[in-house]
Each structure stands twice: as C-alpha cells, then as structure tokens.
Amino acid sequence: MKVIRTLSLAAVMVATSMAFISVSPASAKFHTELCLKDTTNLLCDQPAGLVHFQDKTAVLKTTTPALTITCEGLILGTSLGLSKLSGANILPLEVHVETAGLTYSNCDKGCTATNELPGLVLVLKTGAEAAEVTGHGFRLRLKCGVVVDCKYNWTGLVSKASGSLVVPPNGVITSVEAALTKEGGGVCPATTKLTAEYVPLAPIYIRS
C-alpha cells in the first residue's frame, strides 16, 4: 500500500485514553474480510494474507520549524482472515504487524524514526465497501540530535476505509487529524496529529 501522510505535533495536551478503544457491539453489523478479487456474489474468493503499505511522504510537523522532518516508511502486516464472534458481538478483523514490520527510513535533518513495539490494525466493516480502521499498540520513537527523543503510540487512532469499487482503482484508507498518544520524552509536544491517505499497491475489496 502506498501511504501519503501528514503528522502535526500539537503543543497542547489532548486527553486520549491509553487503553484500547473498541467498537461498540451495536455498530458491528458485519463480519469483515479483506479480499484481493472482486466477485459478483460479493463473497471473498481470494482473502488478502499480507497487507503492505508504502509511505513516501511522512511529514512530522512541530511548532519549531527546525524540527519539521520528512521520512519514508514501510508497513507489512498479516491479516488473520474473517473477523470472529465474541458471544453475540462481531469483532474487528485483526492485521498483525510485528515490530520489524513498521519501519521508517531516509528521514531528513539528521533525525530518525523507529518503531519499538508490535501492533494491530483493526478493520471493521460498516457498510458496502466501507470500514472503520483502528490502530492499537506500536511505539514510534523520534530522535533528532541529542535533545529531542520522543515516543508516541497508535492506540485509538481511527481511520476510514473505502474498497476498490468505491474509490478505484485500489481503494483508500484516510484519517484526518487523528491523534497519536505521547508515551515519553523531554522536548516533545503532548500529541501528534495524523492526516493520512493510504493507497493499496493492489486492489482491495471489503467483504463479509
């Protein structure tokens, strides 16, 4: 998947729970499956196993222009297939991303961005070729020189997904000013805000 993303660091504290933000059972009306092939019966004949993002223009913006940096990133995750039931509730589809599955490179201004923990990308179908996507876990460590050393996680970051039939040719996942949560660091704003557009490298269909 190709990702175009913009992240802006706000200097004010945003109250964001560190616990996982789940989808209420009432909104979970559909099973979820990510598929590589379109079918006339709208069933999934070819489930997507590996989920691959490519991030060409990650921009980390702070209130200090000297700390605004750009990086390239890669995300490789494994879909666990059809979403499951918990009692009468339908759970989101889980895409597991190992620590090494989220990487950043070619950051400018002498900065580095490193993922330190594995995480989940949770996908819940909300309608025809539509889904809600929630991040859980990960730890992004941003270092610039000897002073800036910041850590943020993705827990509760919410995006919206549209399949290939709605946004051709490959579908898209978008998030607008979604907050990453600060975990630690000294000279760091409290919250990173993410505006992103994720475009798959191959067509993706959102099915039940």
Image (tube, helix red, strand yellow):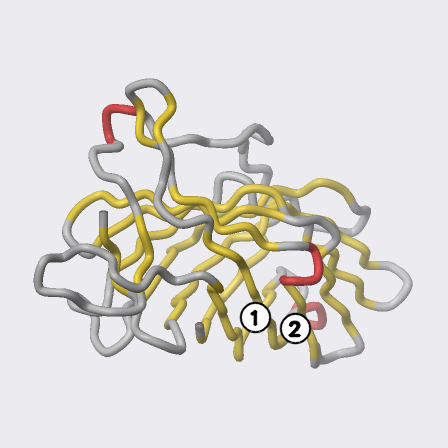
The kind of secondary structure element at disc 2 is strand
Q: Image quadrant of residue 124?
A: top left
> Which residue is the site of mark 1?
59
Are the residues at dot 2 and dot 1 in contact (C-beta closer than 8 Å)? yes
The kind of secondary structure element at disc 1 is strand
> For the point 62% across and 60% down, which residue is it?
63
> For the point 87% across and 59% down, which residue is it?
147
> For the point 20% across and 33% down, which residue is it?
29
Residue 47 in the image, given as x and y percentages of width and height? 34, 60
Residue at the farthest right position: 146
> For the point 24% across and 63% down, which residue is it?
163
Foreground residue among 195 and 78? 78
Q: Which mark is residue 69?
A: 2
Q: Amino acid at mark 2?
A: Ile
Above or below residue 47? Residue 93 is: above
Foreground residue among 40 and 135? 40
